[in-house]
């Protein structure tokens, strides 16, 4: 695929993921401000999200959107501000995407199932 | 044109803030997921970390992160409005509003958590 076509596709994917993230981050910030009242503890976090399918779907969508958005942004910064080759920045993007997906879903699935241990 | 004159403009600083916040948030994400993943090892492990995170220095860091997240959100919304709606005339105001909302969000977090 020619370079310009890749750039266009990545631009579109970053804007689409940004639109999803706009909603997710808004909800997440609201939840953070609500949840910190009186301090945070593990039981409270686990009780809120474990076994709750709606929260699971919300955070799954959140992670998928972040895994698209953040690596493309990092690649753009590296392309514009470092001497790294396009191949190298593409590799960084792919690795970051994988790290976010694996670590994100490990955390979300873990929290979804954690209620059984309480 | 004087070298660096472009820096004396709200849009340049909005661009810098969007870049820096995005990069810092991307670096923070794996740490955030690691901490949440501690719940898998049991509530006590996560509580151990949460106790540490209630120290004043950690609270300051958390507040900074909330401001960065809110700044990236509002800056991104402003950017998309520029790209898709062409709201160029009022964009200086948009920079100010976006920054203000981000700071207010951070303050709401800091005041609620103490």
Image: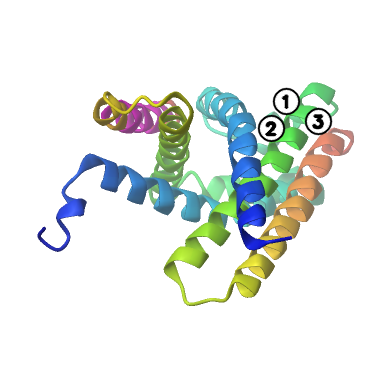
| Residue A96 visible here | yes
Q: Classify B87 as above or below A79.
A: above
What is the distance, in whole Å, between disc 1 and disc 3 at their CAs? Answer: 6 Å
Q: Classify B88 as above or below A84.
A: above
Q: Respond whether the residues carrying marks 2 and 3 are from the same subunit.
A: yes
Circle 3 sits on which residue? A50
**Left or right: residue A50 compared with residue A39:** right
Which label number is shown at residue A45? 2
Q: Is residue A23 magenta?
A: no
The overriding secondary structure of the stretch rendered in magenta is helix
**Left or right: residue B91 compared with residue A91:** left
Residue A75 occupies quadrant: bottom right
What is the distance, in whole Å, between disc 1 and disc 2 at their CAs? Answer: 5 Å
Q: Which residues are magenta?
A: B96-109
Q: Residue at x 75, y 58 (%)?
A: A98
Q: Secondary structure at mark 2?
A: helix
Whether the residues at callouts 1 and 2 have beta carbons within 8 Å, the answer is yes
Q: Residue at x 40, y 31 (%)?
A: B82
Whether the residues at callouts 1 and 3 have beta carbons within 8 Å, the answer is yes
Quadrant where the C terminus of chain A is found in the figure = top right
Disc 1 crowd, CA 10 A, few/some/many (<14, 14-19, 20+): some
Q: Residue at x 43, y 67 (%)?
A: A81
| Residue A52 visible here | no
Disc 3 crowd, CA 10 A, few/some/many (<14, 14-19, 20+): some
Residue B93 in percent (x, y) is at 25, 26
Circle 1 sits on which residue? A48
Query: In which chain is the residue bearing label 1?
Result: A
């Amino acid at each position: 695929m020619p370079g310009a076509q890749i750039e266009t596709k990545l631009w579109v994917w970053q804007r689409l993921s940004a639109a999803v993230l706009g909603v997710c981050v808004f909800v997440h910030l609201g939840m953070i401000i609500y949840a910190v009242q009186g301090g945070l503890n593990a039981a409270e976090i686990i009780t809120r999200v474990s076994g709750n399918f709606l929260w699971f779907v919300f955070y799954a969508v959140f992670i998928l959107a972040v895994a698209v958005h953040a690596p493309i942004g990092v690649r753009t910064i590296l392309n514009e501000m470092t001497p790294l080759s396009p191949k190298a920045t593409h590799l960084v993007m792919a690795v970051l995407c994988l790290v976010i997906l694996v670590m994100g879903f490990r955390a979300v699935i873990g929290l979804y199932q954690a209620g059984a241990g309480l | 044109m004087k070298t660096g004159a472009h820096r004396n403009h709200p849009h340049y600083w909005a661009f810098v803030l969007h870049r820096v916040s995005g990069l810092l948030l991307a670096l923070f994400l794996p740490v955030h997921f690691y901490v949440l993943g501690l719940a898998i090892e049991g509530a006590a492990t996560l509580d151990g970390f949460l106790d540490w995170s209630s120290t004043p220095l950690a609270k300051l860091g958390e507040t900074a992160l909330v401001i960065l997240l809110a700044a990236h959100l509002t800056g991104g919304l402003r950017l998309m409005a520029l790209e898709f709606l062409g709201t160029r005339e009022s964009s200086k105001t948009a920079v100010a509003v976006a920054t203000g909302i981000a700071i207010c969000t951070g303050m709401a977090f800091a005041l609620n958590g103490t």
